[in-house]
Image (spheres, grey):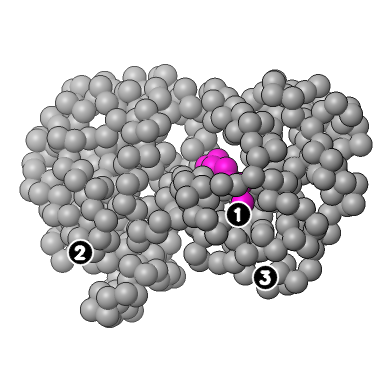
Amino acid sequence: MMWPNGIKFSDTSLPITHHQRTPDGGFYKDLFINHVGIPITNVGDIRDIPQECRYLYPIYVESSNFWNDKDFLMEPLDIPQSIITDVLNDKARLIFSMVKEGQGFYMDNRLQIIKRQIALLGLKSKHVYFMDGNYRNVEFCTTDNDAGIKALTYNYWEKSIGPMSAEKIEQISSSIKSSNLRNYKFICLNRVARDHRILLVKRLEDHGIDKNTILSLGPQIEMSPFGVNRSDVHQEIIQYFNNPNVCRNVDMPLGSLPNDGIGQIAFELQLNSYINICTETFFDKNKSRLFASEKIWKSIVSMQPMILVAEHGALQILKQKGFKTFNPWIDESYDNEINDHVRFDLIMKEIIRLNKLTHNELATMLAEMLPILLHNAKVYADLFSTSKLEEEILNEIHSTWNTYPV
């Protein structure tokens, strides 16, 4: 059986080495099988693919550590010669796939490794794709003359949570329509203590906003250019995080924080607050990167308005996908600010303003936002239940099969 565009996918039952991670079954099932109407039982060994079909050979990258291994700059990946032959004969293509991440191209050796592997394997740039969750992949690799690879974007997290049931949506809608009061003004859950998150938590405490916030912060610090490039901010972050009184995986107002795993939503917390201060994985601007983790989609699924503590232009990505944001109730001009520290200050200014609103005013504001919240819930449900994302990827692969990067 063939995909609608004539490409057939294979499982990776052929021998592989430690260079290639076991594919994420959920991802490959969603992207290459279920959404194009081919039952998983019909996907077999590469040798079973009819001569007239084409296929992809995935090199699945589980961790960014893969791109820091200098050995891959010196030795070819252990890919069966039959696969290489099929690639050279335009029957197959290699695809480096890392859809759970989206770090961009400046944090590691991914560009160098992919280009070097093309040379080591005796291939050309048209033979290889790179795909991860970075929304700037295609733009960067098209406009940067040194990229030399074909890029695709598929963000695993967009479809990792799943929509709420109709009953749950009706329950939340009814509560919002009735302007029911919630106990907290904000929720801000931070699983990993990245520098912009640490500084945000400190600012919330400085202004007493933490008392109105369901708040958590993880136990291990991770720095980025945002916290490193300004010595005063760097010192403030380090001093604060080393303070033994700083919260560590603790919900400060309520006591212990229930498990809020990556693929789970702590509804009892999300729906006990009006606004989600959504702190994304990355904050510092990078021309090769724009990434959205599960946090954004949790906020949308929970029908909460958000203030997005993220990279420049993150709200624009949501709008491009059909979601609506929350201007004029929330001043979202921060999303247009390129300077990271100015953007951070604009975000804090808006949080401080919203914190001055009473619970009654926030409940009324939430009721006014309900049409947008319902719209976003529907857009997400449609995104989750259809094969639009997957078909876009397949069509892009089909249309660029024999093209070289610009």
Question: Could you tell me residue 63's position as x and y percent?
Answer: 62, 59
| Vertical relation: 367 (above or below) 121 | above
- 119 with respect to 405 (left or right): right
Q: Earlier in the sequence, mark 3 or mark 1?
A: 3
Q: Which residue is mark 3?
A: 69
Chain part drawn in magenta: 149-155
Q: Nearer the viewer, residue 269 or 151?
A: 151
N-term-proximal mark, 2 vs 1: 1
> Is any atom of residue 329 visible in this view?
yes
Q: Amino acid at mark 3?
A: Asp
Viewer-nearest of labels 2 and 1? Answer: 1
Q: Residue at x 90, y 52 (%)?
A: 81
From the image, state whether disc 3 or disc 1 is nearer to you: 1
| Secondary structure under the numbered disc 3 in the rendered image | loop
Task: Please state which of residues 209 and 396 is positioned toward the viewer in this rendering.
Answer: 396
Identify which residue is drawn at 60% across, 33% down.
396
Quarter of the N terminus within the rendering = top right
At label 2, the amino acid type is Arg
Locate residue 200, reporting x and y percent: 26, 61
Residue type pointed to by label 1: Gly
Marks 3 and 1: CB-CB under 8 Å?
no
Residue 405 image position (x, y, % from top left): 60, 47
Q: How much space separates mark 2 and mark 3, taking CA atoms?
A: 38 Å
Provide the residue designation for mark 1: 148
Q: Is residue 22 above or below residue 9?
A: below
Residue sitting at x 81%, y 44%: 87
Residue at (78%, 62%) from the top-left corner? 120
How busy is the neighbourhood of tag 2: few (under 14 within 10 Å), some, or many (20 plus)? Answer: some
| Residues at marks 3 and 1, CA–CA distance in whole angstroms | 20 Å
Residue 255 appears in which quarter of the rendering? bottom left
To which residue does mark 2 refer? 203
Q: Nearer the viewer, residue 94 or 372?
A: 94
